[in-house]
Image: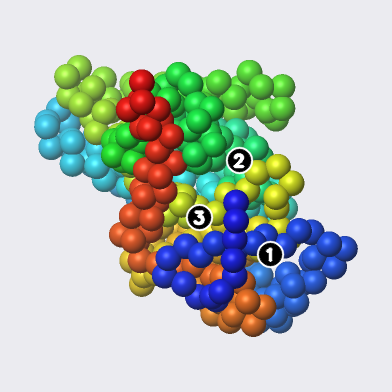
Amino acid sequence: MTFSSDATVTTTPVAVRPRRSRPDAGSDFARLSRRITEAGLLRRRPGYYTVRLGLVTGLLAAGWAAFVALGDTWWQLAVAAFMALAFGQVALVAHDLAHRQVFRRRRPSEIWGRLFGNLGIGMSYGWWMNKHTRHHANPNHEELDPDVAPDILVWSTEQARNSSGLARFIGGHQAFLFFPLLTLEGFNLHVASVRALRSPSMKSRLLEGALLFLHTAAYLSALFLVLSPGKAVAFLAVHQCLFGVYLGSIFAPNHKGMPTFTGDDCPDFLRRQVLTSRNVRGGRVTDLMLGGLNYQIEHHLFPSMPTPHLRRAQVVVRAYCAEIDVPYHETGLIQSYREALSHLHRAGEPIRRQRKAS
């Protein structure tokens, strides 16, 4: 990919030439890290997370209490929509636990992560953490980041040229199909979690599997004991489809449509994280709904930073990027989706062109 550096703060993605790693490549990040540390932005926030974990637990409990109280009625579809939001907030808490934003030590992070992830929403904490750790190490690297590996969608024109099967069938029109496909993401998380139990790299497979089974058994039992079969299926569909759309809407603005890397074409740590990430502007409501991931640049630079510090860290990071002439990309939420979908449309161009030629 060809890059040129000519701006610091942008409203559209800017292409820049990656700086290859050198013995002193970490010095830019080291200076930034000292500023962040001196500002106290890496300190734990136990009070904040005590309240947040309590509220999220209460949100989940309130949803299930409303479900039981309403009984066999089509009004349960409103509860299904509410529960999609609640499940999304639980997933965001599990994300923070995986990054050790809540607890400094690994063991309590894993215990609470499995309770919220496996038992709470039926998503394997171990599977997701393994996948997400690889993403953070090499964001938007086509061979190393599992989030941009060609599967159902293709993320670059090169992937489109080499695509086959479902990716080739969908790829030409994937921008139009992106949000409809997100309705399947909730189901995909459950299936991928169960499939991951067969992986030798999965730690505590028996525990992970037992918690996933307990969640699924309790979830389906509640649906089919309280609701008639038709309403139970409708609740499941609305709940899981909206859950998938909500999660996808949280993560789609973060990296999609930003520069990608291949092979050894990879800059130093600071540039690798900043150039591939997009921040989303907004107020407290945006922070709440996106779980702080709208500060994606700061989160990727300092993954263990507590969520409430990200807003303050943004001021420091943005100013520092201006000092060292590293493009810092920030846009509104709707524009972030527009950029992501435009990128998907461009990536599918080789498939559309080959279909016209055939």
**In terms of sequence position, does the residue under pointer 2 or pointer 3 come before the other?**
2
Q: What amino acid is labelled 2 in the image?
A: Glu
| Residue 230 placement, left or right of 160 | left
Q: Where is the C terminus found, in terms of image quarters?
A: top left
Of the numbered discs 3 and 1, the one sitting upstream in the chain is: 3
- Residue 143: mark: none
Q: Position of residue 45 (x, y in %)?
A: 59, 68
Q: Which residue is rendered at x = 59% and y = 28% of the image?
A: 208
Q: Amino acid at mark 1?
A: Leu
Q: Amino acid at mark 3?
A: Met
Residue 66 position, x and y percent, is 23, 42
Badge 3 is on which residue? Answer: 258
The image shows residue 136 at horizontal and vertical percentages of 63, 50
Measure how far apart labels 1 and 2 are at the Cα level.
18 Å
Nearer the observer, disc 1 or disc 2? 2
Q: Which residue is mark 1?
A: 270
Taking the image as drawn, is residue 171 in sight?
no
Say what secondary structure mark 3 lies in.
loop
Check disc 2 and report the residue beneath it. 142
What is the crowding at mark 1: few (fewer than 14 residues within 10 Å), some, or many (at least 20)?
many
Q: Nearer the viewer, residue 195 or 354?
A: 354
Task: Judge by depth and name the residue closer to the eye, 200 or 116.
Answer: 200
